[in-house]
Image: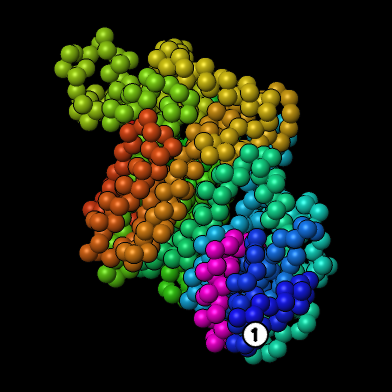
Amino acid sequence: MLPLNSRYFVNKTTYVATVADARTMLEFARQSPLSCVGLDTEFKYDRPGVELKKNLMVFDPRSIHPLLLSLAFVEPNSDGGSISCFVVDLRKPELLSLLREIFRLPVRFVGHFVKVEHFCVWQMGLPEPAMIWDTWVAEKARYLGKWHYRYKLPAHADEIDDAHAKEDAEDDDAFFCSLLATCHRHGVTHRGAAHKRRLQQSFLVHPDGAPFTEEQIAYAAEDAIVAALLFPKQVGVAVNDGTLHHLETIEMPWVRTTARVEWNGIKIDGDKVKKVASVCLAHLSILEAKLLVYGISNFRSHNKLCRFFTAVGMLPLFRKDGKSTFERKQLELHLDCHEAVPTLYVARLIYDMQKSGIFDFRLIGADGRMHPVQQQLGTHTGRQTTRAPNVLGIARILRPLIVAADGYGIGEVDLSQIEVGIAAAIYGDEALIKMYNTGDVYSAMAQHFYAAELTEAERNMSGGEFKDAREDLRDRMKICTLGIIYGMTPFGISRLLHITESEARTLLNQFMAMFPTLKKALGDMAMFGAIAGHVATVTGLRRYRARPGQLSNWERNWMTNHPVQGSAADTFKDAGNRLDRIYQAYDTRLLIPFHDAIVFEAPLDKLEEVANLTKQELCRAVQQRFPQLKPRADINITRPDCWNKKGMADTWERWVTDPLSFMPGSVKEIEK
C-alpha cells in the first residue's frame, strides 16, 4: 500500500458521502501518527421535545436522528500540530462498517459534551470510542464550587427565597461551560461563533434526504476542530491544577457510564403513577388546610416558614450551614419537634414529586421508558444529579413506582456506613478506622463511649447484637457522627436526642475526645483550605472558594466535608465505571447510581450473580484507595419486581391511603 499524501487533507474539510471516501478517511487515519481526534455530531430528533420551563427543552435520547459526524484528525509537527477534518454523512448506512473501524482506533477522541455523541453512536449500532476527553467536563471540574448559588446571596439570606439564586447560578454555570465561552477563555477561535445558534437550529429542522449546505458542513467541522484545539490547553491546565489524574481515571470514563445510564432509562408502572398522581392534589388540599390552622398559609414560602418556626422557638433546628432551610431532608430530621412538621413534610414531599417529573407521561421515550437526564458533577461535591424526572429525589416510600421490565429484576447494592469509614481513612484516625472495621461503627462507638455503664456481656456483643440490645445508645453515636461530618449544631442535636442544648454540647465534646486525630485534622483541613482557596478529594478533584477572607460557617463545613463526601463519590464512580463494562456480558442495565448504592436491572436468572458481582466491585473500589478499611455492602433483591427500600414494595399503597400514616421514622432511619 502506498502512503497517502497527508498535505492533501491538512487544513481542509473533506465531505464523506461514499464508501470510497470513507475508505480513504480510514486509510489516512491508520497511516497518520495521530495525537487525538476531535469529535462532533449534528442531529435532530424524531419526537418533539418536552418543555420543562422557558427555554429548557428535554428530548428523548432514543429518538435521536444522527445526520453528520465530524472527525478532526490531529497530527503533531514542528508547528505544534496539523488538523485534517472529515465530515461524514451518517444517513448513508453503507459507511457504518468503516466508521466502526475508526472508533476502534487506539487514540483519544475529544468533544464538547460528548454524551450526545454516545447517543448517536449507539443509535447507529456502533461501538463508542475507548478513550475520550470531554471538554465540557474538564471545564466544569476546573471551576467546581465557584458557581455555588450561596456566593450570590446577600448577607441576610434568610429573608429571601433562594430559588432564584439557584436558577441564576445554574444559568451562569451553563453559559460558562458552553463551547464558545470555553473557547474564549482558552484563546481558541471558533469561526462559526457568530452563526452558531442559527446553524444548530438548521439541523434540528433539516428535511429528510435534503443535501447539506457548505455552511452547514463547515460549521459541523468547526466544532470538532475547536474541541481538538482545546484538548492540549485543558490538559496543561489540569496538570498545573493537579487534577489530571482525577479527570483521566474517574471523570472521563464516567461520561460514558452516565451516558449509558441515561440511554438505559427506567420503566415506571403507569397505573401506580396515575393513582399516586390523582390523589396528590386531594392530599395536598387537605394538608394545606391543616397547615393553615398553624398560620402557615403557604408552605412553599421560605419567609412564612421562618416566621412560624421563630414564633414557636424552633427556627434553630432548621439552620444548616449558616442559614435556614426547610427542604425535605431537614424536615425529616425533626418530625417530632412540632405537630405541624409531619404535615409540612408530606406537603413538601408531594410538591417535590410534582416537580420531579415522575408524573409527566410525556417523558416516556420511544422505547417505553423514561430517561432521566444525568447531570455529571451536578453537585459541588462531585456527585450526580438528575432531572426530567429527578429520580434521585424520589422519596423512599414511592420508589416502587419504578418497576422491572418483563423477565428482569431490580436489585440494589448499598455500601454500608461508607462515609464514616472514608472520613476515618482520609483524616487518618486509627481509632475510628478500628471501630469502622468491626462491622457496625456506631455500635463500636457506643460500646467504647458507654463502656463504664455497660455490662460485660454488652461490651462483648457483636455490632448487630448490640444494635438490637442497646439501640438507644447506638443512635446517640450515630447522631453525633452525623453532627460532626455534616456540621449540625448542638441545638439541633439536642432536639433529636431530647436533651438540653448544654447536654448536647457536652456530649459532642466527649464524643470528639474519642477521636483527637480526627478533631485536629478537621481543623487543619479548614485552616489550610481557607489559605489555599480549595480542598480536594482522594483522587484530586478540587472544590474552590469564590472569595478570599475569613471562612463562613457554611464554607468551613463543606471544606471538611468535601474530602469525605467527594472521595466517596470518586470511589463510587470508579466502581460504576467498571460495573458498566461488566454488566454488558450479563445483559444488565445500570439504572440508578444512587449516592453510595448501585441500582441495576438484570435478567431474573442472573440477578443473584450480578448482585454479588456488584458487591465485590463496590468493596474492591473502596479497598483499592483505602486498603486500611474493611468495607461492607448490603444486597437487596428480595422484591425484584420494583425498586424498594429493604424489600418494602407496598409503601406506595400505604402512602396513597393515608400519607400521614407512613412517615420516614425516627433518627435511626436517617440515610446518608
User: Relative to 402, is 345 above or below?
Assistant: above
The secondary structure type at the circle numbered 1 is helix
Query: Where is residue 419 drawn, in percent x and y?
Result: 43, 34
- In the rendered image, is residue 228 in sight? yes
Q: Amino acid at mark 1?
A: Asp
Residue drawn at the location 35% of the way across and 48% of the way down? 617
The single residue placed furthest to the top in the displayed view is: 452
- Quarter holding residue 405: bottom left
Magenta region: 92-119
Crowding around mark 1 (Cα neighbors within 10 Å: few <14, some 14 to 19, many 20+) is some
Query: Where is residue 138 drawn, in percent x and y?
Result: 64, 51
Q: Tell whether position 113 is magenta.
A: yes
Q: Which residue is mark 1?
A: 21
User: Relative to 26, is 344 above or below?
Assistant: above
Quadrant of the image containing the C terminus: top left
Q: Nearer the viewer, residue 277 or 195?
A: 195
Query: Where is residue 151 drawn, in percent x and y?
Result: 70, 37
The colouring scheme, among rainbow, by chain, secondary structure or one colour, is rainbow
Query: What number of labels is visible?
Result: 1
The single residue placed furthest to the front in the displayed view is: 2
Q: Nearer the viewer, residue 143 or 155?
A: 143
User: Relative to 502, is 376 above or below?
Assistant: below
Quadrant of the image containing the N terminus: bottom right
* Left or right, residue 401 beside residue 54: left
- Quarter holding residue 57: bottom right
Q: Tell whether position 338 is magenta.
A: no
Residue drawn at the location 60% of the way across and 77% of the way down? 26
- Quarter holding residue 432: top left
Residue drawn at the location 56% of the way across and 77% of the way down? 99
* Left or right, residue 158 beside residue 106: right
- In the rendered image, is residue 313 in sight? no
Q: Nearer the viewer, residue 286 or 227?
A: 227
